[in-house]
Each structure stands twice: as C-alpha cells, then as structure tokens.
Image (tube, coloured by chain):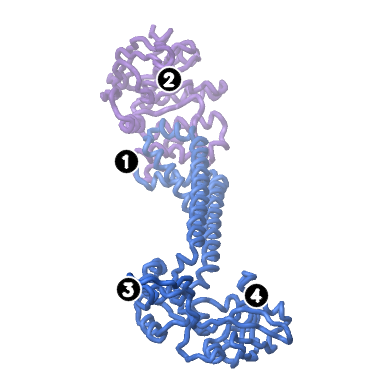
Chain colours: A purple, B blue
Amino acid sequence: MSRILEVKGLSKTFIESDNMQVLYDVDMHVDKAEFVSIVGKSGCGKSTLLYILSTMDTMYEGEIILDGEKLSHRTQTELARIRNEKIGFVFQFHYLLNEFTALENVMLPAIKLNKFSKQEIENQAIERLKILDMHKEAHKKPNQLSGGQKQRVAIARALINSPKIIMADEPTGNLDQVNSEIVFGIFLELSTKFDQSLLVVTHDLEFASRTHRIIQMVDGRIV
Amino acid sequence: MIGSGAISSIAIALMKAKWRQTMVAAMGVMFGITMFVTLLSFMTGLNKMLDGLILNRTPHIRIYNEMKATIKQPIIRARVTETHFIHSIRPKSSFTNLRNSGAILRNLDNDKRVLAVTPRVSSQVFYSIGRTNFGGSLQGVDVLKEDKYFHLNDYITRGNLRDLVSVPNSIIIGKGIADLLLVDVGDQLDVKMPDGRVRSMKIVGFFQSGIKDIDKVLSYTSYKSLQTLMDVPSDHFTEIYVNLHDRSIAPAMALELADMFDTDTEDIVRANAQFETGTKIRSIISYSVGITLLIVAGFGIYNILNMLIYEKMDTIAILKAMGYSGSDVKRIFSIISVSIGLVEVLQV
C-alpha cells in the first residue's frame, strides 16, 4: 500500500506562550484508502497536529511528506496550491459561505484549481453532491439547509478536487446521532468504495472505534 | 494563478450578498467627496468674487501725472560759489494732464503685452442744485471700453452706462450724491467747474460702488463731454488705464512705461498691497480646508473597507483553507474596494 501522508519526528513549541511544547516527536502515517482517526483528551495536541498537517501552520520541527512532496520550507502560495489540490477539509462547523449556493460552495475550490471549464466543474460538483444525496438541495443557500445537510455539502466541497486525503476536525461534533451516523457512513463509503484516505480528529470514541485504525494521543505524544 | 474572471465573480457575489451595506459604504464615501468638491468650489468662487471686487475696477497699470515740484530746480544749475536765499520751493500750479497723450495711446495700442488701453480725464467739480453746492469729482471715460474691460456697468444700479453715449451731455452720479441732492434719474443737475463755468447735465443713471465715500463724490460722464466742459483739446487726458494679458508683469512694465513716457505710473500690486496678502491668505485657508476634508474622507473610506474586511474574516479563513492564496484574497478585496470607488464616482 502506498503512503499518502507520512510524519517523521514532528515537534511543536508555542514560542509566544512560554515555550510550551505541545507535540513531542510525533511519527505517524496514513496509507491509501485508509480511514484513520486521532483520539485524545482535549489539550492533548490533536487539533494542533491536524492544523500543522493541513499546512496552515508552518512553525514546527520535523518532516511531513504528503503524496511524496515535502511540506517544510515552502512559500505560502505553494502551500495554498497543495491545500487546494491535495487536501480536502471538513470542520466541526460547516464553514460554508452564506453568499453562495450549495453548488457554488462546492465549486469554489475547483474554480481556484482552474483545471476544468466552468461547465465541467459544475457537472463534477453535481456528481459529488449526488454521492452525498444532496443534489436536490444544490441551488439552496446554506442558511436554508439543516446542520446535517450543511455538513454533507461541506464534505462534497472537500471532495471536489479529488484530494489525496481528507482531513476532518470533529466532523460530527455539532451533529445529532442520526446525522453523525450519516456522516460516518459517508466517510466509510468514501474509503471503501472510492479508495479515499481519511484522517479524522475526534473525541467520540464510539465513532473512532469503527474506523480502520485509531491513533491515540496523550500529552503531545502518540501512544 | 487563477483566472481573474473567477476572482471577480467571487468579489461580485460577496458584494451582492451585502448589497445594501455596499451601497451605504459607497454613499458614505460619495457624501464625503461631494462635500469636499462643494466646499472647494465655494472657496474658489468666493476667492474669485473677492478678487473681482478689486481687479475689475483697478487697472493693471495707471499712467498719470502727479502735481509736484520739478526735481531739478534752476537754482541747482547755478554756480556753487554764489549764495542763494531761495527756500520753501512750491510745486507749480498747472494742469495735471498727460503730455503727448496721443503718442502714448498709439504706442500702447501697438504693444503686444497690452490687452486694453483706455484714457480718462477727470476734474474737480461742484454739484449744485438750487442753492446747494458741494464738491466732488467728475470722471470722463471711454464708455464702451470701460464697460468691456473694467465692468463699470456692474456697479450701475439705475440706468445704463451706454446712455452716456446716446444721450448728449449726460451724467451718471453716485448714489450718495443722489441721496444728498434729492435728485432722480431724468433730472437736470448743474455742474460747476473750478473756473466758475456752469453746465446743466442730464442724470441718466446712478452707480453704487459699495464704498460710501466714493459714492458721495464721484460721477461719470463721457470724456468728450468733460473735455468740452473743461474747454480743453481732445487729447487732454489726466490718466491712462492699461490692462495687460498677464497681470504678473505689471510692476516691471509700470517702471518701464514711467521711464519711457516720463510720467508717473502705478501698478496694481503697489496700489493694492493688501489685496495680494488677502488673496494669499484666502488660498492658504482653502487649501488647508481642502486637505483636511480629504484626510477626513480618506479615513472614512479606510474605515469602511477595514470594517468590510473585518466582517469577512471568516470568509477569508474559509477561502484560505480551500486553497486560495493570500494574493487571491487580496485581489478579491481590491476588486470590492475599487468597485465601491467606481460606484461612488458614478454617483457624484
């Protein structure tokens, strides 16, 4: 199996708050089509880890290799391109832009990628929404959708550029049992049916126990 | 790099979503700029009007002959060894008319720097009606030229300056004189010359300069009428008014003319020293008001955009997470700012 994401000796210290070290020499990896969850108590550093992996934070020591590309020492523009091409994000809160319809929200990352024509992008977006059973809601604005529906649109948006990996931060944290179940089902389906790699940070142990592999973190270390 | 079409469509969508807010921002900026333009126009207009009050009535160069003692008294030419008992020299009493005025007028008419030349003749007179007499001054002017270049007609409150040409032996008197003598337009007024001759003139109008002391003594008639009245030849002028194309060369040219024609001259700068200072101070005021307004308006625009961006922090974070680079975001907000600016320009 090919390695999609590999982390070697990752350490992180918050210099601005009394040199507090939050990550100690973290080694981990995610393979293709693997559904991995990171669990741990709040404050153990799991969100910090995801934030670094998502390339939004560049102040760290160690090495991160995403799809064969090293992520250290790159300009913000290059990192933005990598985020756009290779990483899909799903957050605890949906973070859709209320100014755009669901369809347009899904299209936005592809417009940035600028690889296909507008018509092709629209077709792809509708396709992604169909996987998530949201195509009937495509022309509604996010504030006309329910919480679970918004999260599904957000997942469709994460999928639009066929990323190498989807990173999710507490994707079910804001959802009720039914919608959590739906989201989990979608994630599992993506990994088994579409060979999608997924890395999910959660504190929901029940959710984590059904993923392929659990990475447990305690006080900035993987155990 | 991503196509600018996509970037602008995002910018437009963001603006459309907050259409009213965008319009209010544009209106706010517009109000600032409108006030700026209005105030500056007001200041400029005021400056022009105040300048006009002086400039319209003052010639750039005035050529005249001052009554004074000869500088080279005959006594100076006498031999030094002899003793003189001559003292208390008095100026010679004579006409203060310009010598060789015809030549001066011809010369100035051909001068490329000169816009207009008009001769004047003036005399001390007594206005008398019934048994009342009082002193004043009568100016004989070239009616058509005076109107064109010195806007004399602007100060005529009753009648018309041109009536001086069409009605023989006519006079336009100051409002103050009319009030004192209880005369009206159409009445006859006796004008007494210093040598005792009297001529009855028809009042065709009143003028009011706004300066009471002038309105109480000054009257206008055509120079031909006055020359006849004074019984002097038709080239007898006491003053020549010269207007130039370029006012700034007046001081230098006044000296040149004084030298050339051997007369006295006075330029507009010397005659109105306080006017130059006033103009300078007024323009300083209008510039400082303008700059202040511009700074205020600038801060207004800056604040509006700042708030716009602050409100869209979430949007920026989401766009960045989706892979939009910092420069993309900057372009989106630049488009929004420029659009607001353009809308505001169109509104103004």
Task: Tell me the residue that label 3 is attached to.
Answer: B79
Numbered tag placed on residue A118 in the rendering: none
Gap in angstroms between the C-alphas marked 2 and 1: 30 Å
Gap in angstroms between the C-alphas marked 4 and 1: 81 Å
Q: Position of residue B190 (x, y in %)?
A: 66, 88
The verdict on a common chain for dots 2 and 3 is: no
Q: Residue at x 61, y 90 (%)?
A: B197
The verdict on a common chain for dots 4 and 2 is: no
Task: Tell me the residue that label 4 is attached to.
Answer: B216
Gap in angstroms between the C-alphas marked 1 and 3: 101 Å
Q: Chain of mark 1?
A: B
Gap in angstroms between the C-alphas marked 4 and 2: 100 Å
Task: Tell me the residue that label 1 is attached to.
Answer: B1
Gap in angstroms between the C-alphas marked 2 and 3: 124 Å
SS type, badge 2: strand
Task: Tell me the residue that label 2 is attached to.
Answer: A200
The verdict on a common chain for dots 1 and 3 is: yes
The verdict on a common chain for dots 4 and 3 is: yes
Q: Nearer the viewer, residue A8 or B304?
A: B304
User: Residue A56, located in which quarter of the rendered image?
Assistant: top left
Q: Amino acid at mark 3?
A: Arg
- Visible residue check, residue B343: no
The verdict on a common chain for dots 2 and 1 is: no
